[in-house]
Amino acid sequence: MGDVLAGNNAEWEFEPEAVVIRYSRGVRGVRFLQALGERRIPHDALDGAELLDGRRGTAVLRLLPRPGADPVVEAAGGQLKENADPYRLVLPEQSRTLAEYYRDELRPLIGPQARDAAGDGPAERFLVAPPAAPRAFKAYDAKALFDGRTVTFRWFWTGASSAKWKAGDQSFPVEELSGLDWRSPELLHGHLRLLRRDADEQPGEADQDPAAVVFGLGYGPVHESLPFAAAVLAAIRSARVRP
């Protein structure tokens, strides 16, 4: 077991080749981070570390994820709120000196300078394990399910548009998908849209697209829909290289 640094929102354990993050539980914890559980972040998946001033007498030790290395970060597309950032450790101000020590210890081990030329730039594959399947959540117009190989949308007659109801329930093997588009339910027009390989063009509105589910108040919350999207995205990427 490596050194452990405990913060207000998580606990970081520093291993020789990775940082293991365990997010805080209980009523004060962010539900999305709790849903991620424990995560092991290899040094190869990081591009840097920084120490920032936090709010109300706190300091923030933050890791900078390498582009393309983490399926959660890729699926989120920069839409997460600050307190839901899985790479932030919030510490009391009196722990700043200790945080500076770990930042300085990490810096020579991560980033382009710690990788050979072949490992520079965006990662060619995901280096952080995705949320495990099977997964499911309720959107406004359907129940979305993922068994590890196939995404299924089962429409609700109370929420689905006539176009979706007419198309019937949908199943999408990951081999038939090129990617996805997750729009946070905390923003206007939140949805999860699957991008199909064989589709030249998909309907512009998510509520008319049988390859999309739409979110609403209490439907498709971040802590359910984003881990789902990350698990699907990782499976799509794996299918590209599967023999």
Image (cartoon, rainbow, N blue to C red):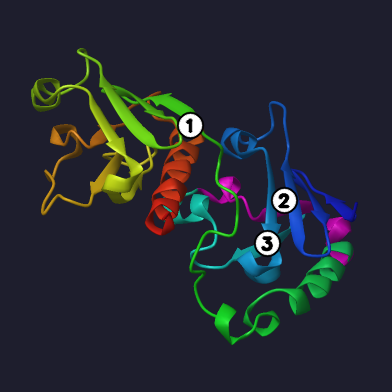
What amino acid type is highlighted by mark number 3? Answer: Arg
Residue 224 marker: 1
Q: In this figure, which residue is indicated by the disc labeled 3?
A: 62
Residue 85 among magenta residues: yes
Residue 226 among magenta residues: no
Q: Is residue 137 above or below residue 157?
A: below
Q: In this figure, which residue is indicated by the disc labeled 2?
A: 56
Q: Pointer 3: residues within 10 angstroms few (<14), some, or many (20+)?
A: some
Is label 2 in a helix, a strand or a loop? loop
Precedes in sequence: disc 1 or disc 2:
2
What amino acid type is highlighted by mark number 1? Answer: Glu
What amino acid type is highlighted by mark number 2? Answer: Arg
Precedes in sequence: disc 3 or disc 1:
3
Identified at 79% across, 48% down, the residue is: 7
Name the image quarter holding the C terminus: bottom left
Q: Position of residue 108 (x, y in %)?
A: 77, 79
Instruction: Work out whether residue 55 can be spotted.
Output: no
The segment highlighted magenta reads 81-97
